[in-house]
Amino acid sequence: MTALHLFYAFFTTGIFVFGGGLAIIPFLNDMIDKWGWFTQNDLTTFIALAEVTPGALGVNMATYAGYLAFGFLGAIIATFSLVLPSVLIVSIISPKWYKIKDKKEIISIFNGIKIATTGLIASIFISLFFPLFQKDVFSVYSFLTLILFVLGNVLMSLKKMPMPLFLAVMALLGVVCY
């Protein structure tokens, strides 16, 4: 693998990642299958680390993935190449945005992107979460993961807990349970 190959992979990912940081996960999952730069277990680690570190979720995950694939230089290349398409697109579109944002075609494009992004995130959730519950893998770890997942969703749905406190509580529960 070359640095140019890494640049290309993350640049093309940056072109098509819509919908926030979680939208990068299917692309990283695809990199596992295509190039094997990191493992499925590494991907779950990227997600956890990206969630608890400051900054954009997708950029943090790209930085970790690039580092694992190609060291410190890989982290820089992956981060830069992931962000570059957004910078270019915003630079081109932003002067015209207020003229085109209410056009039916633009609204339709973004509605389609929202649907696709939701589907991609749902498929990654299924591929990462449900293998924990296969008969040959099921364990106390799987059961505790399910309990923490449900508890986390209940706490988030109440919306009474500030996000930093929520993350601290869930991290503490993770330490206690595992």
Image (tube, rainbow, N blue to C red):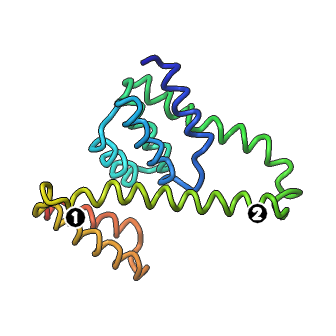
Q: 163 or 23: which is nearer to us? A: 23
Q: Tell me which amino acid carries mark 2.
A: Ile
Q: Residue at x 66, y 60 (%)?
A: 112
Q: 22 or 95: which is nearer to us? A: 22
Disc 2 element? helix
Residue receiving disc 1: 145
Residue 6, placed above or below residue 14: above
* Left or right side of 114 for 37: left
Residue 154, placed above or below residue 2: below
* Left or right side of 35 for 93: right
Count of numbered tags: 2
The answer to which quarter of the image holds residue 72 is top left
**Furthest residue in direction front, as rendered:** 135
| Distance between the alpha carbons at the discs numbered 2 and 1 | 39 Å
Residue 63, position in %: x, y?
Answer: 44, 36
The answer to which quarter of the image holds residue 149 is bottom left
Q: Residue at x 53, y 26 (%)?
A: 7
Residue 142, placed above or below residue 96: below
**Quadrant where the N terminus lies?**
top left
**Quadrant where the C terminus lies?**
bottom left
Q: 28 or 168: which is nearer to us? A: 28
Please report whichever mark, 2 or 1, sits nearer to the chain's N-terminal start.
2
Q: Residue at x 44, y 30 (%)?
A: 75
Q: Tell me which amino acid carries mark 1.
A: Thr
Residue 109, placed above or below residue 84: below
Residue receiving disc 2: 107
Disc 1 element? helix
Residue 11, position in %: x, y?
Answer: 58, 33
